[in-house]
Image: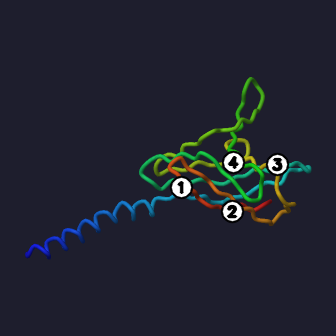
Amino acid sequence: MSRPRYHLAAALGLALVLQVPVAAADDCAAGFQDGWARLPPVEMPVLGGFGTLHNPCDSEMVLTGASSPDFEDVQVHETRLDDGMMRMREVGSLAIPAGGSVALAPGALHLMLMRPVRALVAGDEVELGFEFADGTTVSARLEVR
């Protein structure tokens, strides 16, 4: 192979090799399914948010926050039994295992959707964005019930 052809072949080969991690990263994105938000039984400035976060990747993903244009604040909380009382506390980060998922459910890990910026009724959808430690974000929608 002549030198110019060798350099062209090497450059093309390198370009293909460099594309593999990019393609793998694109295939490896967290997902959120079955999202819904529960209206409180009495008028309150907070809703609970639920669904399942999925991590199809080969390494753990760490959820560091969430936000929504439909709420002034969104936090991840856990409910747990503490000295015979059920208590909620904010969770600063949430690890989603490689190839695994984490359920956000009533009475367990869940989203606290605080101070809606508009009146919500059953059947509405709200937007949500999850932020991860690696800088990626995932958009989701929750059905208000």
Tell us which disc is closer to us: 1 or 4.
1
Q: Which residue is mark 3?
A: 46
Amino acid residing under circle 2:
Arg
Tell us which disc is closer to us: 4 or 2.
2
Q: Which residue is mark 2?
A: 141
Tag 3: Cα neighbours inside 10 Å, few (<14), some, or many (≥20)? Answer: some
Taking 127 as reference, is 7 left or right?
A: left
Tell us which disc is closer to us: 2 or 1.
1
Q: Tell which circle, 4 or 2, labels the residue nearer the N-terminal end.
A: 4
Question: What's the residue at 69%, 53% (across, down)?
Answer: 67
Tag 2: Cα neighbours inside 10 Å, few (<14), some, or many (≥20)? Answer: some
The number of discs equals 4
Question: What's the residue at 39%, 61% (across, down)?
Answer: 24
Tell us which disc is closer to us: 3 or 4.
3
Residues at badges 3 and 4 in contact (C-beta under 8 Å)?
no
Q: Quadrant of residue 36?
A: bottom right
Taking 46 as reference, is 14 left or right?
A: left
Determine the CA span between mark 3 and mark 4.
16 Å
Q: Which residue is mark 4?
A: 105
Which residue is nearer to you in this view: 30 or 12?
A: 12
Amino acid residing under circle 1:
Thr
Q: Residue furthest right?
A: 42
The image position of residue 107, as x and y in percent, is 73, 42
Q: For mark 3, give the secondary structure.
A: strand
Q: Tell which circle, 3 or 4, labels the residue nearer the N-terminal end.
A: 3
Q: For mark 2, give the secondary structure.
A: strand
Determine the CA span between mark 4 and mark 2.
16 Å
